[in-house]
Image (cartoon, coloured by chain):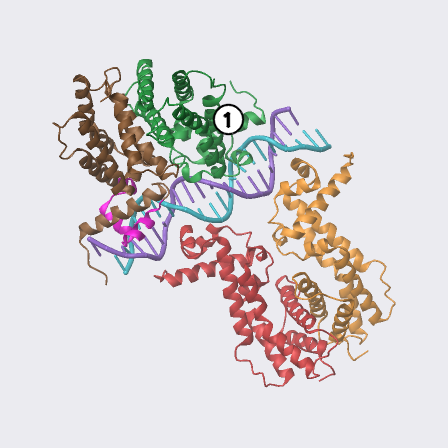
Chain colours: A red, B orange, C brown, D green, E purple, F cyan
Amino acid sequence: MQQAVSSQDKRAAILDAALAVFSERGVDGVAVPEISARARVATGTIYRYFSSKEALVNELYREQKAALGRRLNEGVNHKAEPRELFADWWARMVAFARENPRAYRFLELQDHRPYLDEASLRLERSVLAPMSARVRRLQAQGVFRSDVRHEVMMAMTWGAFVNLFKAERDGFVKLTARDIAAARDSCWRMFVASDG
Amino acid sequence: MQQAVSSQDKRAAILDAALAVFSERGVDGVAVPEISARARVATGTIYRYFSSKEALVNELYREQKAALGRRLNEGVNHKAEPRELFADWWARMVAFARENPRAYRFLELQDHRPYLDEASLRLERSVLAPMSARVRRLQAQGVFRSDVRHEVMMAMTWGAFVNLFKAERDGFVKLTARDIAAARDSCWRMFVASDG
Amino acid sequence: MQQAVSSQDKRAAILDAALAVFSERGVDGVAVPEISARARVATGTIYRYFSSKEALVNELYREQKAALGRRLNEGVNHKAEPRELFADWWARMVAFARENPRAYRFLELQDHRPYLDEASLRLERSVLAPMSARVRRLQAQGVFRSDVRHEVMMAMTWGAFVNLFKAERDGFVKLTARDIAAARDSCWRMFVASDG
Amino acid sequence: MQQAVSSQDKRAAILDAALAVFSERGVDGVAVPEISARARVATGTIYRYFSSKEALVNELYREQKAALGRRLNEGVNHKAEPRELFADWWARMVAFARENPRAYRFLELQDHRPYLDEASLRLERSVLAPMSARVRRLQAQGVFRSDVRHEVMMAMTWGAFVNLFKAERDGFVKLTARDIAAARDSCWRMFVASDG
DNA sequence: GATGAATGAGATTTCATTCAT
DNA sequence: TATGAATGAAATCTCATTCAT
């Protein structure tokens, strides 16, 4: 059913269409008219909302990265037990990847990197900052081992998580809830000082 | 003094030039004449050795993926103690990433994925197969936990490793030998049944 | 406080805005929405008053060319002494260029020429016609030399005048009242039969 | 008869085609494929020789302006009698306009002005510099009146000349050799201190 | 009448591939 | 076999004009 759409809907429709096609074929693999066709707007309309394809990529990236940031950090109970906190964090990552598979895939693309501007890169760094701080504190408290630097911990955990879902997307595994829980516990074991 | 070069040298020069520029700016970010210029070869010559840019990307991918496979699997002492075996494997990954940074970066690119054909994807899967088999055996022997499927283990370990080096390339960490050893031990802890 | 404006005010505002931007950046260098923005009018409104950009250019051209024509020809005392008449004519040209620099600049643009229709070109020719007739008469009276055709005289005088002000606009000279008077006398000497 | 053309011929063909169409319809009125069609090359070929349409316009402008400069200044006999020198100069301007009507028209276009870079503008100024210096000397020698600044003289003479040929092109006059000689003498009278 | 977001044809420019030499 | 200038289809982006509100 074709609905009349407001101006903001049109902007949103463009971003949504861009997310759909970028996540499937990469940023360089998609021509602007393909985005406009999917968004059911004229090609020129895209340039009313975004000054260039590059600007569109950046805005989409920031929108989704910010959404990821909110999903990971909003309302986190910092007083929870470390293991519970870690489980919460893991659950949030899983939820984002499951609920927004296209956004998740888009954010993990590498081919938008040459497009990203300073603001986008700054935002990227800020998303994992709260967790990073928390990891550092857990090290100070003796919960996490101190022989692994927190940047190393963060990079490995994030990489392990991301590649797990990439493996699923590429058809190497079909992840069950049990797999995901087991993966979470494996990650926990990576850094914890003694078995909990 | 310009040297006459054999056909094979020319082919190799093209692949080498392609690796250099692809690893820096991605597959889509590089025009074919840039490759030929760097290879000190005419543009048309590339098409004598490779039927298309896509074919060049696939051949380069397979060449480097196979090199990685050899680096990881050749001469592995399967009778070594599990922990030693794992350390060897880790050392091989590190060595490849350090010795062939351009190859490593190229293989981790995502934007060549739409170019890859069935043969390339098959090869990709085969590289980690020996390790995967070994992981399975270690689980059967009770060395590795059995509550995590081996595909999950493989995906997480590989992801943790890759992202660690990506973090370094993106300027988030400068990895010391100590960091890399600590990271290796963390990974080991992920899956081992009891502390070794 | 935003004032309600009559239709005629709106039409005038559009022409005024168009004159402002055309005179600065040429006809081809200006997009229609820029004109509407400066006129504080919606883009579509321009098309209520002018059927196309081309029509707008023509109407603006005719409006300003007619204004120039009036400035040059209205109330000229044809009984004045030839030299006085010439001085009056010269003063009128100077006054127009000084008082309406944007109109003067717009009329001297070349890039509206492909837009001009027959009516505009006819009007252009009519503006200098009275002077041309007068020059012819002065030749018949023996005041002006007869070895130079009046069309040639007209073209040279007009060209000399126009280029003098163009040189000023392009920053090659800063014209004083004395320069302008000297220029006028030079022009007079061009054609007069003997020194007056 | 289709001739094989060398690389330089192709570059020249593009410049020649551009001159032909620009002089007829202005720079903004011509799309790049029209130039390539007239030059009998592919559109992309233009971009092998010129980095952009703007660069093409500048190179064409400089080529023709330099040709004009040579035509006006090369081999001028500075020891000739002033009047002879002036006649020589005038004859050179006429010859250029007659022999290269398209170049002459192109150089007099106004719509390439927004395209012109600093090098083009510098060249423009240099073309009339020798004459300008000569005019100054003639003033110092008492041949030319001193009550008119040399910049004013130059601007007027050049403007008179240019507009004379513009009037012919626009169909207002058909210039005979006699007209051109009469125009030259008129210009001479403009500035000479006493009749020569 | 007025609005201004939307349109889509057409402009400039890029680049994988070809082919005459 | 090697060359690299040439090609032209396709990409990005602009802008005169329209039309639903």
Q: Which segment did they paint magenta?
A: C30-57
Overall secondary structure of the magenta section: helix
Residue linked to disc 1: D13
Q: Residue at x 64, y 62 (%)?
A: A171
Q: Residue at x 46, y 60 (%)?
A: A15
In the image, residue B59 above or below residue D57: below
Name the secondary structure under disc 1.
helix
Q: Is residue B144 visible?
A: yes
Q: Is residue C25 left or right of residue A116?
A: left
Q: Nearer the viewer, residue E12 or C141?
A: C141
Point out the residue furthest to the top here: D178
Spot occupied by residue D52 in the image (x, y as percentages of width and height): 50, 39
Q: Is residue D84 left or right of residue B17?
A: left
Q: Is residue B113 magenta?
A: no
**Residue A130: where, in percent of width, then height?**
59, 75
Asked if residue A101 lies left or right of residue C46, the reply is: right
In the rendering, at what x and y percent does residue A155 appear? 67, 69
Q: Position of residue C52 (x, y in %)?
A: 28, 42
Residue furthest left in the image = C79
**Residue at the location (61% across, 44% down)?**
B31
Q: If the image is split into quadrants, where does the N terminus of chain A sit?
A: bottom left
- Label 1 amino acid? Ala
Please name whichever residue, A187 or C169, is drawn nearer the observer in this view of the structure.
Answer: C169
